[in-house]
Amino acid sequence: MGRIWNGFYTLPIPNQLGSLWVNFNSPLLWDVFAISTYLSVSLVFWWTGLLPDFAMIRDRATKPFQKKIYSLLSFGWSGKAKDWQRFEEVSLVLAGLATPLVLSVHTIVSFDFATSVVPGWHSTVYPPYFVAGAVFSGFAMVQTLLLIMRKVSNLEGYITRVHIENMNKVILVTGGIVTVAYLSEFFVGWYTGSSYEDFTYLSWGAATGPYWWAFWALITCNAIIPQFLWIKKIRTNYIWTFIIAIFINIGMWFERFDIIVINLSRGHLPSTWSQFSPTFVDIGIFLGTFGFFFVLFLLYARTFPVIAQAEVKSILKSSGDNYKRARDAGEPTPKVTPPVVVEKETEPVVEKDSDAKTSSLLESLGTFDINTQQPDDLKKVKGIGPVMEKTLNQIGIYSFDQVSKMTKNEYDLLDSITDSFPGRAQRDDWAGQANKLKS
Amino acid sequence: MSSKVIHALYDDDDVLLKAVKDVRAAHHHIEEVYTPFPVHGLDRAMGLAPTRMAITSFMFGITGLSFAIWFLNLIMIQEWPQNIGGKPSFSFAENMPAFVPIMFEMTVFFGAHLMVITFYMRSKIWPFRKAENPDPRTTDDKFLMEVAIDGNENDLTSLLEKTGAIEITVNEKH
């Protein structure tokens, strides 16, 4: 596979190369079929699920170029009732088909090793162990990326502690399965009494031999460290979850390293015994995988929705606090009348005797003629809510230009007029914010 | 039939669902409902027939399985029998266990991809297709019911107002 222009060798395509023909009895060919099916079905599932979200971005896009791109991506999705009905069933069937695909693809990858005669690879426990390992490492990788995305994209309201904890429980269970598989490999290696089995990647020979560091890295990262997730305080903590997930990522990398490098370093033929040392090509490819992954991931995060918004919308209302309260109180939840907007801040009264202060305030800020000038949306300034905006308007402040001229003097004056939130304007630096908004 | 339609906009899925039922009960023809997310029970309320997507997937899966059996028999048993690792090509039945993974993958491959293609074709969604939702807000957070007008504009408007629509407009059918 290093020569990708010869990649078609792996497919049953008639060719001019004489006896070159794929072997349908070989796990390597099964793997070609399993991976292609898994990859293509996942891609189609993912894209179909994205269509409604692309449609939303298309309809909200303000720039023509973006509108064009997202129109193309959304395939003209319109959200018709019949389309949604089909969408739901297609999603259900694809989910049903993708689940056995997960099992099959990891089972078949393990066949690549298990059907060979190399000591340490030739192992019947491989299929279930690889499936559990895939779920284990997959969840850890998701935790790693999710916890960062959650912070960076401000998704705290959508990705909650409950999600993280539940994922940690899955990691704990699959990590347990992986650990049991390690132990059984270790036991069987010892119990056979075969000298070859004493240098498989899970054996006493490996633990004390030249690759002891790889062996113990695997055991520590995959078998020991995840056990901390038994403690509720740790598995509900974002930072600890992140740290443990990183360890599992490293551990699962070592699992592959150990399976391939340690097992191949001591084969049946002593003349083949050797230590592995990576060439610059090996290292380059390894670093390249990181680059390739992060380019795609960051492009995705920048341009595509990172959570399935159509799905979130379908539970957004019923998961809200107001809805739950109304439902529990037996009130009719679908309210026909639009809900009344309740404002938390009580409207401060501008008193008559503050007229003098008002005029002196306006003197330094400059007056605003509501009839000829366009008022700015003062709510854009952090710290100014709808009520405060109304108050400011009552005083005669309508534009960012006026707000930007405010200094300590004006803030104090404003506080004494409105009588609410003393010091808040200064703390939030309304003038500085308004200055930015002005341009 | 007149070429005019009335568009009623809603901002709540439960209100919409009840409105659909009311409009249907009053024997008006709902042309289409556009929603930002799948509203459960909407298809039944509108009287849409259940979708047959799952059945098509099953049939495509059977097709994939048959195709895999046919070509594996053709190329591995009939056309080019080989002795691989001391295991000769006897007959399809005897060599079949080694073909199970491929047969499974082909079944899933056909079932998934052909179903999705069928979905795209039936719902008329593909690259470069123009969207048909009459109001861009329907992919965001609003729901739109399109009802055909048959010389009963005033009746219909008052009925829709009662169902809790937040906006009612009369449009030419496009």
Image (tube, rainbow, N blue to C red):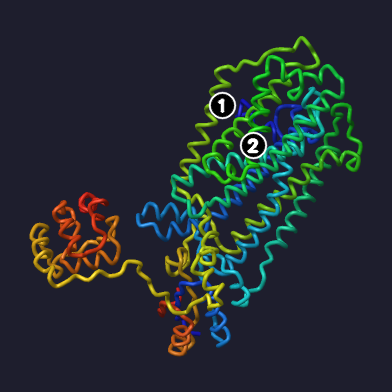
Q: Identify which residue is drawn at 56% across, 34% down.
A: A246
Write down the chain letter for disc 2: A
Hey, what amino acid is under mark 2?
Pro
Residue A97 lies, in percent from the top left, at 70, 52
Q: Nearer the viewer, mark 2 or mark 1?
A: 2
Residue A363 lies, in percent from the top left, at 8, 60
Is residue A35 or residue A6 the one in the foreground? A35
* Element type at mark 2: helix
Mark linked to residue A286: 1
Hey, what amino acid is under mark 1?
Phe
- Which sits earlier in the primary sequence, circle 2 or circle 1? 2
Is residue A294 or residue A174 the one in the foreground? A174
Is residue A1 or residue A368 the one in the foreground? A368
Circle count: 2
Write down the chain letter for disc 1: A
Mark linked to residue A226: 2
- Judge whether A35 appears above or below A377 on screen: above
Is residue A280 or residue B57 the one in the foreground? A280
Mark linked to residue A175: none
**Can you see residue A307?**
yes
Residue A211 lies, in percent from the top left, at 68, 18
Quadrant for residue B114, please give it. Answer: bottom right
Q: Identify which residue is drawn at 78% across, 25% down.
A: A120
Residue placed furthest toward the top: A271
Quadrant for residue B53, please give it. Answer: bottom right
* Element type at mark 1: helix
Can you say which quadrant of the picture contains the N terminus of chain A? top right
